[in-house]
Image (spheres, coloured by chain):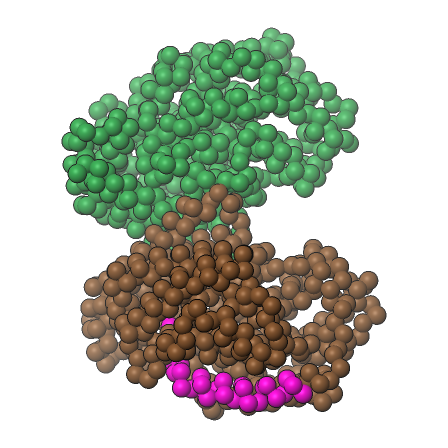
Chain colours: A brown, B green
Amino acid sequence: MQNTNYAKYIAIMQKIADVQNASSLLNWDQETYMPPKGAAFRAQQLSTLAGIAHELATSTELGVLLTELSKDDSLAEKEKRNIKKSLKNYNDNKKYTTEFVQDLSKTISEAFQAWQKAKETNDFSLYAPKLEKLVELKRKECELLGYTGHPYDAMLDQYEPGAKTVDLEKLFADVRSQLVAFVKQIAAKPQNNDAFMFGFYDKDKQWDVGIDLLKQMGYDFDAGRQDISSHPFTTNFSCQDVRVTTRINQNDLNEMIWSCIHEGGHALYEQGLLPSEYGLPSGEYISLGIHESQSRLWENNVGRSLNYWKANFKTLQKAFPENLEKISVEDFYKAMNIVKPSLIRTSADELTYHFHVLIRFEIEKALIEGKIQVNELPAYWNSKYKEYLGIDVPSDKQGVLQDIHWSHGSFGYFPTYSLGSFYAAQFFAQAKKEIPNLENQLEQGNMLNLLSWLREKVHKHGKYYTAEELCVEITGEKLNFNYFMEYAKVKYKWLYQL
Amino acid sequence: MQNTNYAKYIAIMQKIADVQNASSLLNWDQETYMPPKGAAFRAQQLSTLAGIAHELATSTELGVLLTELSKDDSLAEKEKRNIKKSLKNYNDNKKYTTEFVQDLSKTISEAFQAWQKAKETNDFSLYAPKLEKLVELKRKECELLGYTGHPYDAMLDQYEPGAKTVDLEKLFADVRSQLVAFVKQIAAKPQNNDAFMFGFYDKDKQWDVGIDLLKQMGYDFDAGRQDISSHPFTTNFSCQDVRVTTRINQNDLNEMIWSCIHEGGHALYEQGLLPSEYGLPSGEYISLGIHESQSRLWENNVGRSLNYWKANFKTLQKAFPENLEKISVEDFYKAMNIVKPSLIRTSADELTYHFHVLIRFEIEKALIEGKIQVNELPAYWNSKYKEYLGIDVPSDKQGVLQDIHWSHGSFGYFPTYSLGSFYAAQFFAQAKKEIPNLENQLEQGNMLNLLSWLREKVHKHGKYYTAEELCVEITGEKLNFNYFMEYAKVKYKWLYQL
């Protein structure tokens, strides 16, 4: 009897996954190949599929099945965990009233349009009333979903299941106390040169280099592909079709390199999930923080290391002799690791990046708590940038209006970016302990043992563990900021001769 | 009240269209960009979406709504016709039992695999048992759907609504009596030279030429795009996103040219449907025959004319001077219009093509009538090729196994190919009467008046008329094979100096 029920559960979950994966393809196409006039009906088609997926995910049939299965002791441990997670999702979904969902979706659509207009014209006041409405709805959403500690926990939980505001406060207190001082030390030193990164780099040659880097990481092109889009992203329609996109700037070598390696890291996680678990929690990534740990581990711990470029710099020199033949691999390593406070999060270095996140975390928390109002945001934002990064924000366009996230209603998302880097540092430290000669292998361009280790330790488990459990399972302890600081200190002491 | 119902009807129809268009995108991606390992889950996703679309199209809610609306006299004429057509589809869909649908879908899947294997190994016996089962199911399907005249009418009706076997018998009797004799006359004449079509033609240059030809026809690249696939096709996800694919053979200039113009003709029809009618019969093509009339009109009546190449041959010569600089436009015109009996339908010339269709029509009819058995097919096929085309079929691979259609369960589809050419000739004759100086415009590369005429006469009406009504509306009479024969006679008398 229980087997029949569990099989029914799998069938429903796979049906939902099929519809969601179809939506993902529609989105991928929209960002890559769709002709401009296709946009209007595409939006309608996406909305229809979202509605169908929601109906399936909140059906009484599924609810009854999950409730029965949650009492079924004969299930294996993995099955029990799947049911537990699916039941939580089901119950969360059921907490939303149709009225609330419609109100939220309408407000998001208006807020997004207002944000675009406001950013274009550098006029925050165009966006403020819609954002205000959105914050109000998000506060309502916290109450709908419920929480035991801080209301912001309900926001975090959507992207980082189980994460608590109180823990993030401690974590970001460490960031503040340790990283601010460290970045000041660096700022006191002479800056390294990266002018040669901004010469002319032919688009097609950059493309070829990017493909080679992905192949070297172990990205499977039989189960994926790379295309061009205006904002790089990773998407998947199963673990056997995981696609990345990149962006190429002929006057900045950084964009292609870091988007390839970063998205490649995300994609390796998705390709490492198990096809047998398709549609189930055990076939899904744990959280955005763990997802980001995979992209950041490849981008920062591997890609921004000297070893990595000892293996790959010659290829780059061969592709771009005019730009790079007189540059040493050490110069190149220094150029890609310039630390410098800046205005825009997405182009920040790997240290000051976390101040950008910290500021957004503090603002989001204050908004949800009702401690600040939307109209105070620009001034509050600017004062924070002065405080943590020591810079003046010349315009809201380069300040509070720079990110798309809030206009999409994504509150609680930003912290996962920092969590990703910190998990990455901790996992990579462990990998170095467990894989003999890892650094040496990377220097030879051999990434496969590292990939196997990640497959075994992280990818194949899907959502079997929570992020915290996984971290303990792999490293023997919970997330610990010291790993990141240790990594940063060793690396930047050499780079800036501290 | 009736407005509310009609609005509900539109909403359901658009929801069905959204799901079907999402499927179409999944199919497009499968043929163009999907990595190989993506195939298995893609098949499952397509099957899930097909199931959802079928559920929506056969829901009691829709049935009740259509029945009520079909009695509503206050509807406008266009609305009434939409309801009538949707109700017919609904009733047809409801005639299928779940058991029959599952049996058919399983048999098709097995027959398709068996056909692939049989074609690969040139062994009809591997395919025969599955095809036999399929024919049996198709005969059952005729009974399920019902018919008033010939059982084969029920098959035809799925692709060419309203078409009757008895009319096709008359039509193909004309084809037989007039075209067989005419092709014999041509065969008695010396053959024209087309060797230069098979030199080396660079892929990228061919691609550029194809894009230019599409633009000249009026294909809107803001509402579509062209990509490469192994079999050229046209697909759409709304009339504002209509895509074509092409195939390029570096040793045969014909493939790219004819696929671009042919698929371009299909695409212009879809781009000419009205966005306001999205999801409704009034926003859909009439029938496969009328669809093919649009592709064939552009491919044959326009593209294979001397006028067309007077406008475009210079561009081609510029792109491929080594191949074409010594060739005159008349030589080129002769080369692209070689008439010669051959084995393979898809590469046949525009005259002998119809013998291929005629043979398939006679075989399908005989199978449905039970007059021949599947195991007799190869011998029957070969005798027909001898009779109509005067050629011996050296292997089943090049004979009865060449086409995919039957393995997909598509019986009643082939005749629409001939209908398309015959409608095209009749429509084009009318266009020449109504558009002053049309031939002259084409010679100047000006296709826009012809496109406007087709938009006005055919495209914008969607399914408002049946194929027969449309033909009478445009030309004042029903489909008349004489227009095709007249076109053929004038053209080929000059080409072969008859």
What residue is at 36 percent from the left and 17 percent from the top?
B473
The image quarter in which residue A114 lies? bottom left
Q: Tell whether B277 sits left or right of A445.
A: left
Residue A363 seen: yes
Instruction: Check if residue A181 falls in the magenta segment.
Output: yes
Q: Is residue B418 above or below residue B85?
A: above
Q: Which residues are magenta?
A: A157-185
Q: Tell whether A165 sits left or right of A63.
A: right
Q: Is residue B327 above or below residue A271?
A: above
Quadrant for the N terminus of chain A, please.
Answer: bottom left
The image quarter in which residue B495 lies? top right
What residue is at 21 percent from the left and 78 percent from the top?
A71
Quadrant for the C terminus of chain A, please.
Answer: bottom right
Position of residue B464 measured from the top left corner of the image (x, y, whole percent): 32, 27
The image quarter in which residue A409 lies? bottom left
Residue A464 seen: no
Q: Is residue A19 above or below residue A8?
A: above
Q: Is residue A386 above or below residue A95?
A: below
